[in-house]
Image (cartoon, helix red, strand yellow):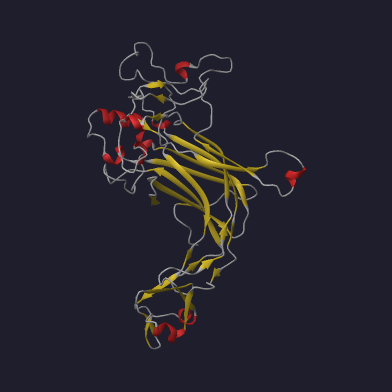
């Protein structure tokens, strides 16, 4: 697992799938994230946040209240309260899910190898060069000045490079991933949020981030488009797909046997604001006026634990370095260097909505997600075995 800040305040869960070098993969990748079943006996996250905050201004933890999920667009965390969803006591935590199906294709080429710098750097090789620059001490055996570790024969005979700025790594690598992915479907219960009255200091919930999908094509068919005419790029940003039925195939309302109904006597009280999820005739999510009142309601307002997903390839690559007199040299001959060229990892990088451990005054790097998640990843490439090892850490062998 890893943590990412970059003003999105996401907490990353990583999954790695080991793939051979230059193996073309093409298949379906399914990612399911749901509020953990440890919370089955509790309100859904958004309702729980509202109930907790309503019980007292200091009762809701600042790490939740001032997380990126519940703050506005300015650079300082702020909290404008929460909207009552009318779901108190319904224990709908199961609805806090986000499910994805991607078509993933491509692979990684690992045969290019390390790229030595062509210019703008100084090279060192052999005992005389390294010793005169202060990087090594001793006399057969030789020792690194910064670690006092004896040099191997490969380190002594290999070439080390120093960047013109004395510290950066001037070496490169020809290996590259060519993994692309296309979102086929995304389904969740949290796409109805439309509270946008931040300027009026009203309740704000606008952090359901879409997944980007991109298509290259031509505007029309024809001979000219089969030649070197410029492609048209179409971008789409998906919050959710899917239809939630409230009637059967004959138009009969499904009623309480299929979805929550409050019964009589609930025109007021703790659950009077409840609105069921539905799709018939809807063209927008909830809308809020400047006074904070909802001008249209939408039951599709549960919590989405996923902020962003990235899918890419990576291989283990580490250059060795040593420092002396303010200068750093780099090499791939060093004992600490790694360059795996037999396999690479397909990375499923899931950015979950993270907490704000810094509290109310500034954004902090999350150290956990806002809800405890259950995450399931399945990859089924066509023409290959589906029995891949899916690991929570990068493969080393």
What residue lies at 56% left-to-right and 63% top-to-bottom?
175
Q: Is residue 263 left or right of residue 56?
A: right
The answer to whether residue 336 shows anywhere in this view is no
What residue lies at 38% left-to-right and 22% top-to-bottom?
294
* Rendered image quadrant of residue 207: top left
What residue lies at 31% left-to-right and 42% top-to-bottom?
76
Q: Is residue 221 left or right of residue 280?
A: right
Q: Position of residue 250 (x, y in %)?
A: 58, 14
Q: Is residue 229 left or right of residue 336?
A: right
Q: Residue furthest top?
A: 264
Q: Position of residue 140 (x, y in %)?
A: 40, 88
> Which residue is more in the foreground, 381 or 134?
134
> Which residue is more in the foreground, 63 or 249?
63
Q: Is residue 257 left or right of residue 204?
A: right
> Which residue is more in the foreground, 270 or 238?
238
Q: Position of residue 369 (x, y in %)?
A: 36, 43
Measured along the vertical axis of the image, is residue 108 above or below residue 381? below
Measured along the vertical axis of the image, is residue 54 above or below residue 76? above
Measured along the vertical axis of the image, is residue 318 above or below residue 47? below
What residue lies at 23% left-to-right and 32% top-to-bottom?
57
Q: Position of residue 79 (x, y in %)?
A: 30, 35
């Amino acid at each position: 697992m890893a943590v990412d800040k970059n003003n999105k305040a996401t907490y990353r869960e990583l999954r790695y799938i080991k793939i051979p070098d230059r193996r073309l993969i093409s298949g379906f990748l399914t990612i399911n994230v749901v509020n953990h079943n440890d919370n089955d006996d509790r309100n859904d996250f958004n309702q729980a946040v509202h109930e907790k905050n309503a019980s007292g201004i200091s009762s809701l933890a600042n790490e939740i209240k001032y997380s990126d999920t519940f703050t506005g667009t300015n650079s300082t965390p702020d909290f404008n309260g929460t909207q009552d969803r009318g779901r108190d006591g319904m224990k709908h935590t199961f609805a806090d899910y986000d499910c994805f199906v991607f078509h993933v294709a491509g692979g990684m080429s690992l045969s290019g190898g390390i790229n030595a710098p062509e210019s703008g750097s100084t090279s060192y090789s052999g005992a005389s060069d390294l010793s005169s620059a202060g990087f090594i001490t001793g006399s057969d055996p030789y020792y690194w000045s910064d670690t006092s570790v004896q040099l191997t024969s490969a380190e002594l005979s290999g070439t080390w490079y120093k960047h013109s700025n004395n510290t950066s790594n001037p070496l490169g690598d020809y290996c590259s991933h060519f993994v692309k992915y296309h979102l086929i479907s995304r389904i969740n219960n949290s796409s109805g949020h439309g509270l946008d009255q931040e300027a009026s200091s009203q309740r704000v919930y606008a952090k359901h981030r879409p997944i980007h999908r991109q298509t290259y094509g031509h505007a029309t068919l024809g001979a000219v488009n089969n030649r070197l005419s410029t492609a048209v790029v179409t971008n789409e940003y998906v919050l959710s797909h899917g239809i939630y039925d409230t009637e059967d195939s004959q138009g009969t309302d499904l009623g309480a046997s299929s979805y929550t109904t409050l019964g009589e006597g609930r025109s007021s009280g703790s659950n009077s604001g409840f609105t069921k999820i539905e799709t018939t005739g809807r063209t927008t999510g909830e809308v809020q006026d400047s006074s904070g009142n909802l001008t249209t309601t939408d039951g599709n307002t549960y919590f989405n634990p996923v902020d962003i997903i990235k899918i890419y390839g990576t291989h283990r690559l580490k250059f060795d370095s040593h420092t002396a007199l303010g200068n750093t040299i780099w090499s791939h001959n060093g004992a600490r260097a790694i360059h795996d060229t037999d396999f690479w990892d397909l990375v499923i990088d899931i950015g979950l909505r993270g907490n704000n451990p810094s509290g109310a005054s500034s954004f902090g790097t999350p150290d956990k997600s806002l809800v405890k998640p259950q995450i399931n990843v399945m990859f089924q490439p066509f023409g290959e075995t589906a029995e891949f090892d899916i690991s929570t850490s990068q493969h080393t062998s």
